[in-house]
């Protein structure tokens, strides 16, 4: 199946610093990628839809100035958590939609990035 | 987007067949049903997808009745490694920009 990677897999940072997370589609092009956040024992919550070459679409309640998303190419989207605080500590997961192939059309998810803000 | 309802948790012994049912009463004509599996601290993994009737792959089977208001994921002969959270999602296959919205999922615990 299609492969989506994320980097880094985990990061620890001090409060007030910014952290960048990369999401790459390794063997396919993705004009649209999605960013999710997951807190312990909870489900994935959609944060934003990242579109190549245009501005991201944020879900209600997600601060676009705090979570900067850039989708500069068809295989790379980045999420930057600016001025991170302890409440931003979470598991961040990206996904990319693979178009119709082999009778299926679905999203493939990255392995996630664990962020801990001290 | 159609809302889904699943049991919060299920327990099973190794070697048994597990059936997880998902309700999606408001499913739209263009919606497909997709199931994902998630292990702790990992991204969700695609299991199976279907539109109607029955779909089978090397991992699972998906049963969808004619009215499509529910679906059942069937895992044959589960093992300890199948312990995970299973999510049922419905979404429009045609619209490439439509994200998948996750419900609470079903936490499956397989016991030796």
Image (tube, coloured by chain):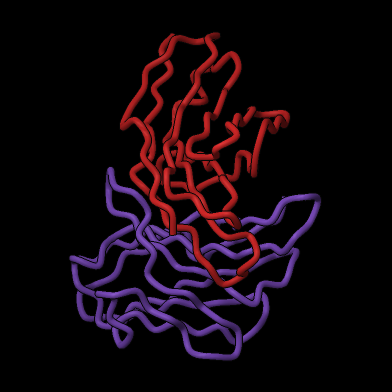
Chain colours: A purple, B red
Which of the image's four quarters has the C terminus of chain A? bottom left
B34 or A17: nearer the viewer: B34
Above or below — where is A19 with respect to A86? below
The residue positioned farthest toward the front in the image shown: B67
Q: Examine the image and state in which quarter residue A92 appears.
A: bottom left
Find residue A116 and report its horizontal and vertical position in percent. 28, 61
Q: In this rendering, is residue A65 above or below A46? A: below
Residue A112 seen: yes
Residue at image point 28% right, 43% down: A41
Q: Is residue A113 above or below residue A56?
A: above
Residue A110 visible, this orientation? no
Question: Total label count?
Answer: 0
Which residue is located at x 44 percent, y 35 percent?
B22
Residue at image coords 30%, 59%: A90
Q: Position of residue A86 (x, y in %)?
A: 18, 66
Q: Quadrant of residue A6?
A: bottom right
Q: Is residue A76 above or below residue B74?
A: below
Give x and y (percent) for residue A34.
Answer: 50, 68
């Amino acid at each position: 199946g299609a492969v989506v990677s994320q980097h880094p897999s985990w990061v620890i940072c001090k409060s007030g610093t910014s952290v960048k997370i990369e999401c790459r589609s390794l063997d396919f092009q993705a004009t649209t990628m999605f960013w999710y956040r997951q807190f312990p024992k909870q489900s994935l919550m959609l944060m934003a839809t990242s579109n190549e070459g245009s501005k991201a679409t944020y879900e209600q309640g997600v601060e676009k100035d705090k979570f900067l998303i850039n989708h500069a190419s068809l295989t790379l989207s980045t999420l930057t958590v600016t001025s991170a605080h302890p409440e931003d500590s979470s598991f961040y997961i990206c996904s990319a939609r693979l178009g119709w192939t082999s009778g299926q059309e679905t999203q493939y998810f990255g392995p996630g990035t664990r962020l801990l803000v001290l | 987007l159609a809302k889904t309802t699943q049991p919060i948790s299920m327990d099973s012994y190794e070697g048994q067949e597990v059936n997880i049912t998902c309700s999606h009463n408001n499913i739209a004509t263009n919606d497909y049903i997709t199931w994902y599996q998630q292990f702790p601290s990992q991204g969700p993994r695609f299991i199976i997808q279907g539109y109607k009737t029955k779909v089978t792959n090397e991992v699972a089977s998906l049963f969808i009745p004619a009215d499509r208001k529910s679906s059942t994921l069937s895992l044959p002969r589960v093992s300890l490694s199948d312990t995970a959270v299973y999510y049922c999602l419905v979404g429009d296959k045609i619209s490439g920009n439509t994200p998948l919205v996750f419900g609470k999922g079903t936490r499956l615990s397989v016991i030796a």
